[in-house]
Amino acid sequence: MDRLHITGGTPLHGHISVSGAKNSALKLMVTCLLTDQPVELTNMPNLADTRFLAQLLESLGVEVYWPKGTSTCHLNAAELKSTIAPYEQVRKMRASFNVLGPLVARSGHATVSLPGGCAIGARPVDLHLQALEAMGADLRVEGGYVKAAAIHGLKGAHINFSTVSVGATEHAMLTATLAKGETILENAAREPEIEDLANCLNSMGANITGAGTPIIRIKGVEKLGGTTYPVMPDRIEAGTFAMAAAAAGGDVTLDGCPVEDLGALIAKLREAGVTVDADEAASTLRIRRNGSPLKAVSLSTQPHPGFPTDLQAQFMALMCTAKGTSIIRETIFENRFMHAPELSRLGADITVRGQEAVVKGVDHLTAAPVMATDLRASVSLVIAGLAAQGETVVNRIYHLDRGFERLEAKLGACGAKIERRSGEDE
Ligand code: EPZ
């Protein structure tokens, strides 16, 4: 298994271009199931997760043409040959569960495995199922699978989510595009990826308004057509590189950066004493820190526009060497501090108390072999490694490959001493 070897202590200088957003791409790919016309997605990130979803779509009968190394993915679901998504596929990647509603909308029935829990928490799908039931789908859970049918088609519904859920909002929105009548989603998630999905669906002929606000209205249409649509830039990748630059020091500009989606992070970075020049018009974010110490800053993760849970681990890595004590609260997932003990192996002083981590800044981190069990936790160890003294070895980097495109090449181009080597996992 591959590992990353990182020799810390070198400031980063240069430009990094931001890739297409994984968490948008995964939902945009599913739109192809709603039409017999071709869907062409540009600015697609080449990631283990997006390639994996392409395989699942192929198994359903979607023709996928996405040459290696290119960022345009052609999807054509002219005819579906299966409406079954098996356990092995949905367990490996939860976003696969979102094929359920679109398959029912298109074919009248589907059988999709329940995803099960994952490293960051239980992550139930009750809200997804409630939304589909409200739209008239008949659901049975058998042997770990959801069997769904809507023999007479789906109908619009008024759905008030009890919890803000990105996945359930997206799943309901995808499904409602072809339901008869109007669907209203209340307490909908407001993440930028939801607006991206709505824009893509509208470009296919859907009638969705209010995406990006807590109330989304979807007027069902008879049919959707094809589209060519660019995946939005990845705010989480951009935020991660911003924190890498802040941790290592130096002067890095992120190009093609969705500045307007990073307000909560930018405010926290400035509070911590990092110089941030945000240019929305030019889509650039310049991060500078030249030797000045970081100040400890506390935060609580929140649904958008609050501080994203997907940047919490990286911010904790940054706070490890800040002056003072920072309290980091995770409110979205119940088990998203797996990086804390690994950061402690690098010399960080972190105490986890339930949903809170208390980070007492130390003078410096010292390299060690580390590993993590999810994507964002793994990249927080890369950030810590860039700031630590000595050579940090990050194991199990297949997690990183799920969500970061050419991570070591992008950081390496800014002077980071980071190298991928094959070898036995530790
Ligand atoms: C999406 O997950 C992202 N994944 C996650 O990114 C991200 O952390 C999360 O949104 C929050 O922003 C993708 O987009 C593929 P939720 P999702 O439904 O949709 C509870 C990463 O690292 N809930 O908004 O699964 C749930 O347990 C990943 O890229 C229910 O109770 O997240 C959680 O506590 C990790 N019932 C909360 O809602 C449900 O039916 C928010 O989860 C659904 C969710």
Image (tube, rainbow, N blue to C red):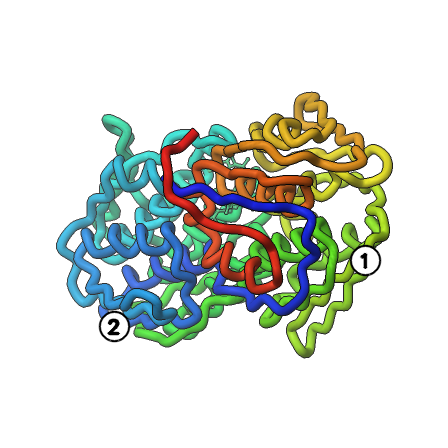
Q: Is residue 38 above or below residue 241?
A: below
Spot the residue most to the front.
390
**Marked residue nearer the N-terminal end (2 or 1):** 2
- Identify the residue shown where x is 53% and y is 61%: 410
Q: Callout 1 environment at 10 Å: few (<14), some (14 to 19), or many (20+)?
A: few
Q: Nearer the viewer, residue 91 or 157?
A: 91
**In x, y percent, where is residue 276?**
77, 62
Please state, as top left, top right, bottom left or bottom right, where the C terminus lies in the image.
Answer: top left
Tell me the amino acid under the disc marked 1. Asn
Q: Quadrant of residue 336?
A: top right
**In x, y percent, where is residue 288?**
77, 61
Q: Is residue 243 above or below residue 361?
A: below
Q: Nearer the viewer, residue 421 or 248?
A: 421
Numbered mark located on residue 37 in the image = 2
SS class, disc 1: loop
Numbered mark located on residue 290 in the image = 1
Tell me the amino acid under the disc marked 2. Gln
Mark 2 vs mark 1, foreground winner is 1
Q: Quadrant of residue 322?
A: top right
- Identify the residue shown where x is 59% and y is 48%: 187
Q: Is residue 364 left or right of residue 161?
A: right
